[in-house]
Image: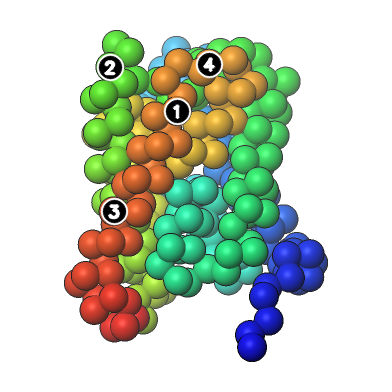
Amino acid sequence: MSKRPDFKTDLLRCWRETVTEGIGTFILVFVGTGAVMVNQLTGGTVTHLGVSFVFGAVVAALIYAMGHISQAHFNPAVTLAFWTSGFFPTTRVLPYILAQSLGAIGASATLVLSLGKIGNLGATLPLKDNWVQALVLEIILTLILMLIILGSGLDRRAHSSLAGLAIGLTVGLEAAFMGPITGASMNPARSLGPALVGGLWSHHWVYWVAPIIGAQLAVFIYGIISHRFQDL
């Protein structure tokens, strides 16, 4: 009879990975939403395309710097997608998501102390309160992102050394062309930090539901085209 996973034992074993996820998400939110706030503070010197580049660049850098430690999720939707695809243990899902959420909250709190409440703290808000539009677009954006993650970072047939670049470029491109409409979150933790610290909860649920659905759809699609992940 197989032994059921011991949550406490596994948590003690993966504390380094969990802490890394918290630190990585802190850096992601601090740098990315910080760019949004600095752009507002300085009258647009960073520019929208500059903010998009910052988000993509920091994601790529974090993957190369921390991917070998924690797999570089930094995103609850990604963690859940790896779990449902069978490449991540159940006992580590909650610790990872908690660490990611705390890291994002800590980053937003630090930015408020440093820069003040400006630029909505980089919060993701639907354009003109159109939550239906934001829901659909965030699902599609996250689906695309997760397909890139699975195809470049998980599939052994791909050139894994380029995974960070591919994923970072995807984040930057999606932020560039869809950021003005939805905020291009694709990441519940990234949206949670500014929402909680800034008290900006308008349609916040969209930025949890949509990325999770999009990532799960990507798992379903990639499962089909990779023979239920057997090709990986």
Q: Earlier in the sequence, mark 2 or mark 1?
A: 2
State yes or no: discs 3 and 4 in contact (Cβ < 8 Å): no
Q: Nearer the viewer, residue 163 or 188?
A: 188
Residue at which label 1 appears: 205
Residue at the image point whose x is 69% and y is 26% from the top: 109
User: As shown in the figure, which amino acid type bears the numbered disc 2?
Assistant: Asn
Residue under circle 3? 217
Residue for badge 2? 130
Q: Is residue 135 above or below residue 64?
A: above
| Spot occupied by residue 163 in the image (x, y as percentages of width and height) | 38, 66
Crowding near pointer 4: few (<14 within 10 Å), some, many (20+)? Answer: some
Label 2 neighbourhood size at 10 Å, few (<14), some (14-19), many (20+)? few
Residue 155 x, y percent position in the rendering = 34, 76
Q: Residues within 10 Å of mark 1 (few under 14, many from 20)?
A: some
Quarter assignment of residue 180: top left
The span from disc 2 to disc 4 (Cα, nearest Å) is 15 Å
Look at label 4 and name its amino acid: Leu
* Viewer-nearest residue: 103 or 58: 103
C-alpha gap between disc 4 and disc 1: 12 Å
Q: How many marks?
A: 4
* Mark 1 secondary-structure assignment: loop
**Residue flagged by tag 1: what amino acid is it?**
Trp
Q: Earlier in the sequence, mark 2 or mark 3?
A: 2
Residue at 55% from the left image edge and 23% from the top image edge: 195
Nearest to N terminus: mark 3 or mark 1: 1
Quarter containing the C terminus: bottom left
Q: CA distance from mark 2 to mark 1?
A: 13 Å
Does the residue at mark 4 contact the one at mark 1 (Cβ under 8 Å)? no
Q: Are marks 2 and 1 in contact (CB under 8 Å)?
A: no
Identify which residue is drawn at 30% across, 31% down: 135
The residue pinned by badge 4 equals 200
